[in-house]
Every structure is written in C-alpha cells, then in structure tokens.
Amino acid sequence: MVDPIKFTITSNSTSIGLDQEFELIITARYISLPNSVFVFEGSNSFRLKVITPDGFEQTGGNFRDFVGTELSASKPSESYTLRGKFTRPNEAGSFQLLRSHKAATNSSTFVQVATLSFNSYNGEQVNQKDAGARIMLNIPGYIPYLNIAQLRSGFADTARSVFITDEGKFGLFRYNSESTEADDASMTIVNGSRRYERVYNGVVNVEWFGVKGDGLTDNSANIQTLLNNARFPNIYFPKPKVSYRWKSIIMRSNKNILFEEGTLVEGMGTLANSEKMILMYQVKNITIKGINVTIKDNKANYTSGEHRHIFSLEGVTNVMIEGIAANDSGGDGYYIGIGAEQRYSENVRLTNISADNNRRQGMSIISGKNIVVTNPILTNTKGTNPAAGIDIEPNAADEILEDIRIINPVTRNNAGAGITINLQTFSNTNRVVNIHISNHTDDGSFYGMAFNTVTGSIAGSVLIDNPVWKNSIWNGLNVRNYSATACPIEIRSPNVINSNTIGNTSVYLGAAILIYRAANDVGAPNVGNVHIFNPKVQDNRTTKLITSAFVFQDLSEVGPVKNCSLIDPISLTGLDDGKYVAVFGDVAISDIYGKISKDLGPWHLLMTYSTYKSVIHNATATAPRSLTLLNVMSEFPEIRIEVRAAQEVKIIPDPANSIVPLAPELGKYISSNVVGSSIVLKKNTATSWFIKEMQGKWVAQP
C-alpha cells in the first residue's frame, strides 16, 4: 500500500535569526504508479495541517490548516506557502506536515508525511549572528517514486530509498554507501557518487534485465547474460503480454527458473541442425518449473534434420523440470543423453511435462542413471523416424540405462510407437539395463509399445506394468527380432483394445500382441524372452480387425521362439476363438481362467501354429470328435485334452508323427470316451508327441 501523493516541506533559507522572517514551501505532487501497486480509493485527495515548533509565529502565506485539493494526471501538483519567524530562542525542533482525507476535521486522524528540522549552532539560540544555525530537511519513512532518469539526475536528493516506476523495472532501491557496482539499470542505479541497489527476495525478474514479452524481440542475449551471472541463481519469468522469444540459450549450474502460470515461450525458428532451444551441457543443480507453461519452436521451418531439441540434457546431474510443454521442435521435446566427460545424465526428474508435434521424438532417453519421468503426455510426433512418444535408445556401448522409471505416461497419435525401446548397442556388453514403466496409456500411435532388434545377450530387465494400448494402427505390443538371451521383458496386466486399425489381414501380423522375427530379419539364433502376464484383449468394433490375440513366431524360420511365456489371460473379447494364440516355439502357457481353451462341441479341430489351445475338451459334444495334430516343430507348447462328455475324443497325429509311448507307430491315433480321462502332450522331437501326464482310459489305434 503506497501514497500516490508525494509531500515535501522545504525552505530557501539556510540560516535565520530571531525575528527574521522566512518562508516555507509545501508541495503536493501526484505520482503515476504502476498498475500492480495498490492504493486506497480517494487517496489522491487530501487536507493538511502543520504543527509548528515552540517560538514560531506565522506572519503570512496562503497555507491554512485543513487546506487541501484533489490531484490527478491532469492536475499533478499543488503548492502552498507559509511565512513566519522565531520570536524566542529554541535549541532544536521541527515543522511537521500532516495529511488526512478530503473531508477531514479536527476529530479526524492525520498522519505525518514530511518534516523540516532545525537546530542552533553549538547549542546557542537561533539568531542572525549564528552562522551555524540551519534548517535541514528530513522525510522519515517516505519513499520517493522516481523513474531511472530522475534518480540518475539527483531527484532523490538524500533519500535513502526510492521506488523506481519504469515499466518492467519497477521496484524498491536502497542507497548503499559501500557499493562499487556499476549502473546496469537493473540491480544498481548510480547518481553521482551515490549507488542505489535493488531490494529483492533473492529472485530476479527477467524484465529487470530488458527481457521483453512482446512476441517479437529475440531475448537470447539478455537471458544468456542473466544465466551467465552467478549472482542470480533464482530467476522468474512473469507471464508476458504476448510471448517471450529466444533462439537458443545455454543453462548454467545452480539455477532455479520459475515461470508464471500460463507463460508462453516461442523460438525464432532459425536453429542450426544441432542447436537447441535450451541446452544443458555437463551442468548440475537446475530446476525449471511452471504451471501450464509452453515452450515451442517453429517445426514448419525444419524440413530436414532431427537434433533441434527444445530441452537437451547432456551429461547433467540433479535436474528437475516440472509443468512445461515442449512443442513443435525440429527434433525432440526432451532429450536426455551424454556429455564428453560424463557419459550419462543422472538424477533427472521430469514431472507433469508434455511434448506435442515434435519432429523426431516427444522424448529421447539415451543414457541415464536414476531418471524418473512422472505423468508425461507425449503426442502427435511426426516428421522423421522413430517418431515415437518416448524413445529409450542408447547410441553407444559405453552409455547407461540404469533405474529408468516412467510413471503414468500418456502417448497419443504418434507416427511411430507410443514408447519404443531399442537396446541393440548393448548387445554382448557388460551393461545392465533396468527400466520400469508403469500405467502407460497409448491411443492411436502406430504401436502402443515396440521393442526393436537385439542380436546378442544383455543383462538386466525391462518391466512394463498395467499398460493400456488403444486403437494402435498396427499392434498394441510389437517385439521384433529381440534376442532370446537379451534382458527379459515382462509385460504385466496389459490391455489391448481395438488394435490393427490399418486392417492387416495376416493371422500373425494383425495380432494384438506380436513377438516375432520378420522374414528378412537377421539376428540371434532365437528370438524371445518376452513374458506376458494376465493380459486382456478386446475388439469391440462392428468389423473385427484383430486377427490373433497373441503371436510368438519366427517368420524367417531360423529357429523357434525361446524363453517366452503367456500367463493366465483375463479376457479375450470379440475375437475369433480359433485364433487366440499363434505360437512357433517354446512358450510356457498357463490358462487358469480357461480363456484359451476350446470346447469341440459340434466341430473337429486341426491344431497347428496359428490355432493353439491350451485345453481342448468335448463338454458339449453329442457325437465323437477328433483333434488332428499337424506336423509342428519340436518344443511346441504342451496341450491338455479332457473327456467331459461320454463321447469319443480321438487324437490323430500327423502321418509323420507318433504319440509315445502309447502309440509309437507313425500316424496312429489314440482315443477315449471315458468321462474324466485326460492327457497332456508335449512335442519333444520333430516326429513324436510325448505323453507327460495321463489319467483315465486311453487306447491306441489297433
């Protein structure tokens, strides 16, 4: 709360004697204050009183108690005169100027707004012979309101504090007799030998340093100067009138940046191919925060290249970014990678961030330790591959992916995968991978999640908890050419909804979850080491497009899929029940909920790679039924056949196969019509099915 009127009481006399008349000048001056400064309604009107010292007698002038007026921009000042003299000695005293509101009376409260002090020389009486007698102005507690030019020109006189009113610069400055700082019009203003320094709470406002939010000015140089100054660790960006613009800035260590809610920052759209809007290179202890803050470049200007990132964190330590959208880049919204000396970034926290319409990636994690990304939203990546929402992909064998945690990520409409993980550069190295992604939701990206080629062994683990992949253009989960000796991938409780919107009709390639090697892929002897727990798959479209729920297949036929498991599907809705699972390899399958079992009912069944069932029974059959086992590879998953109705169930092997030990001759079937009978078969060689378990009565073909 400030007074919009500045009051002064002065005199042209420097010394007076007894009975010597002198004149006091009382001035009221209206101050135009910034809109951010609050004043009481009616405070531009006043009434005045003067308390005179003992021995003073008024002899003239136009000042009378309760004199007053109203000031404004059109009437900025008013002056009064008070003439008088001292009629008897007085060692010291003061004239006190008091003000009150425009309707004040003797019963109203008045406050002191200015004083004029005097004293006698060496304690003697004030008289005409006393050369040392003087009248000295003093305004206790009053702060002049000046612009920078006025302060530099001496308008502050001997005031110890002033309030600067220039737009973008306003604030309180205090005289510091010990200061040697140069005049920068931001933190120090100089008037002759007097230096006034800004009073602030440790946080500097970028507007003080000439940063403009007009949507036009390139502020790169001014912001960089501020970042380079170690005196200012805490920096504040108030919400601009339009936007702040800059081309590129380089962060320094030990900086805390706060953006006011709703702030918009725009790039100049002129970055060279490897320039970044915000570069953090081998720095530490940086915090950047805001709420609903957007930092964006001009993607349309970048028709080639892929490294013009918004945020590039390279070999950093202890960095936190919160509440910031990084949009429209010519590269990534966020890039986390290496420096020349530190080959990883460490202790990075990205919270409630987003990235939209970036050219290469919403976010890239290349090399890091203890990276935590919470509640990110990565959308509409398009321009150059991989075009993912998030890409986790080391570039070299000396990089690191340890304690990478991504919590509640949302990805949408990315031209590539919602999240893609590419670990090939760690093949056959000593690197240990640790990645945990929880509660991922993707809607409408090419894949919900994808893992790409790994040709060798890798230690560590990748854990994916509770993902929901909706409306994927191809598969909800796509794991391609991933070595069976690479670190295990565990997918817990995935939910795939309406995938394969492109309408691929292949029983393999149109799957909701696809673990495979393509026909022309080159890689490890076996692909696999993917484990699916408690999945759900649903296709609730009128025209069903999911061709299989789960596929484990090597289309190159180099070798069987290895080290995979499919554990207890929860629900399979809207799918052709003959095409739930396609499997080419050694896959451990559990089905405690009976979702991939088959009731023969009125049908005979052919069992091959694309029609696998874990349990086959005849509960609703009203006539004999048969199960024909085509010539599948050895290590084909085990199957269980149960007789639940008193009708014959005949198990017929391929003519080149046998069922041992009960029917060791090639092509001979076995059968049972005894309710309660069951048998578990496992293909353990290229030509024989082995009976792992048998109950009840089964007989071989004569």
Image (cartoon, helix red, strand yellow):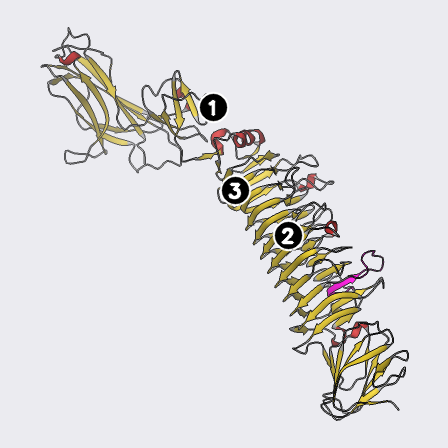
**Looking at the image, which residue sits at the far top?**
129
The image quadrant of residue 138 is: top left
> On the rendered image, what quadrant is the N terminus found in?
top left
**Residue that label 3 marks:** 287
Query: Circle 2: is it few (<14), some (14-19), or many (20+) Cα within 10 Å?
Result: many
Image height of 384 relative to 87, above or below: below
Numbered label attached to residue 379: 2
Q: Which residues lie in the magenta part?
A: 509-526
Q: Is residue 519 magenta?
A: yes
At label 2, the amino acid type is Thr
Residue shown at 58% from the left, 52% from the top? 376
The spot of residue 69 in percent (x, y) is 25, 28
Work out how far the residue at label 2 is from the one at label 1, CA to CA, in angstroms: 43 Å
The spot of residue 243 in percent (x, y) is 55, 38
Image height of 271 relative to 610, above or below: above
**Looking at the image, which residue sits at the far left?**
88
Q: Is residue 161 left or right of residue 564?
A: left
Numbered label attached to residue 184: 1
The spot of residue 622 in percent (x, y) is 76, 92
Residue shown at 10% from the left, 18% from the top? 55
Lower sequence index among marks 2 and 1: 1
At label 1, the amino acid type is Asp
